Amino acid sequence: MPNTQIESGKPGMLQEMQQDGLHWFSGLLSKVGIPLNDITLFILAISIIIVTAFLLHFILHKVVLKRLYSFSKKSSLVWIQVLTEDQLFNRLAFVIQGIVLLVQASFWVQHKVSILYFLIICTKLWILLYILLSIFSFLNIVLHLSNRLGISNNLPLGGIFQGIKLLASLFIGIMMIAAIIDQSPWKLITGLGAMAAVIMLVFKDSILGLAAGIQLSANKMLRIGDWLTMEKYGADGTVIDIGLTTVKVQNFDNTMTMIPTYALVSDSFINWRAMQESGGRRIKRSILIDANSIRFLTKEEIEKLSNSTLLKSYIVERAAEIDKFNQEKNYDLDISLLNGRRLTNLGLYRAYLEEYLKSHPSVHRNMTCMVRQMAPDFYGIPMEIYCFSNTVVWKQYEAIQSDIFDHSYSVLSEFFLSAGQSGTGNSSTVTLARDSEATMVEDAKPTLELGKS
């Protein structure tokens, strides 16, 4: 038996096989007269490691993984197809190869091949690296699968997974350093307590983003696909990604806006998801009425407006109510317009618009619908239409809104009303301005004529 001593103990199955092989090989060398020294032992160790690595690589990558990928391509199940998209099994195979190599190198180091200790350190780094990459692949697969199944629409998994990747990278990095200096990783982790302030400063945005992502998810404040408006950052569009540090918004003009994730928790923003889920979008716009065109209606004008299908029942009920009131108070309507109550063209116009909206096929029946008179301003008296469309599709919504206001402006003359608009002769303010300008021109004529002479 050679001088090299084999350590006893309770070896595992692989080590037992290696020990049996070493005994057999040492006996074979003894028969041919070759001593089993450090050089032959090193050559033997390297040869076995290389042969084992090639065989294991061939079995895992050329046989097992090749059949697995072939099976996934033929499968109709989504989750099986996604599992093979991000090289998860490739990286796990390298982890297995590294573990087998580490066991072999450790065995030969125990048998006085100390030069292989460097190989042990490299193998540990190899295993830790591919464990980290496997974690990345697994998280990417879960994210892709959740995207296809629609789960990520309700949860900002992208930001959460980025936070997990960051923590995993820090932990694996500590373990790599511990493997190089041959120290326990827990000693390094406890030693990092003194550097906590520096770490917090360096990774401030990442930590705030991770906390904000969890809050956004827990409170259901934001999802991928939501319509977000945030004037502070110039964002008005669809959320396409919720990351660890930034939220990506594609604006309606096809520009991109990046918003810090924590800003969505610290600042205010508008999420239009509730509107989209409700099935109705608000129409809130005013028609400006010229104050000079508002007046009482004559009997002939009321009879003419009574021919309207939408107004007929309203006029009958309202006229009966007004006549009853005037008779009870004994008002003589012929003496003065100030006596009693009368129908006005603006009042009938407002009633007509309400009935028109109720009968409109694109106005939501189960949501607020009204026409109200707002406070007058410089341009006229605003008559506001407040209702909801029965669709949230932007193009259809704009078409419905335009159709309503096209009709509303078109029937103004039927109620003997004029639109209040700066720059036209219908506005009282413009009329006053024109009178003032005319006076100024008349006053300036003698001066101009004098100048000519």
Image (spheres, rainbow, N blue to C red):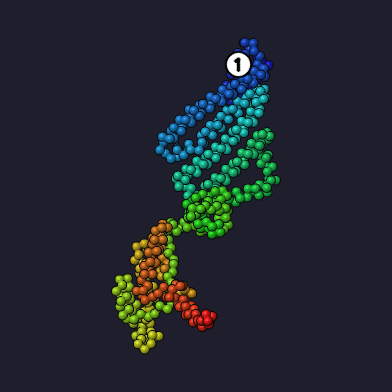
Residue 151 in sight in this render: yes
In screen coordinates, is 131 left or right of 77?
Answer: right
Which one is in front, 34 or 336?
336
Residue 251 point in image, percent of width and height: 49, 54
Q: Is residue 154 visible?
A: no
Residue name at image x 56 percent, y 29 percent:
97
Residue 50, position as x, y percentages in the image:
58, 24
Which residue is most to the front?
Answer: 453
Q: Which residue is mark 1?
A: 25
The residue type indicated by label 1 comes to Phe
Quarter of the image for residue 95 reads top right
Residue sitting nearer the eye, 365 or 183: 365
Where, by quadrant of the figure, is residue 96 drawn? top right
Q: Position of residue 47 (x, y in %)?
A: 59, 21
Please determine whether, in this image, residue 302 is positioned above or below residue 147. Answer: below
Toward the viewer: 260 or 331?
260
The x, y position of residue 380, in whole percent, is 45, 74
- The residue lying toward the viewer, choosing from 13 and 126, is 126
Mark 1: give few (<14), some (14-19) or many (20+) Cα within 10 Å: some
- At horizontal 41% and vertical 73% (from top left) the residue drawn is 419
As helix, strand or loop, the secondary structure at mark 1 comes to helix
Which residue extends farthest top? 32
399 left or right of 141? left
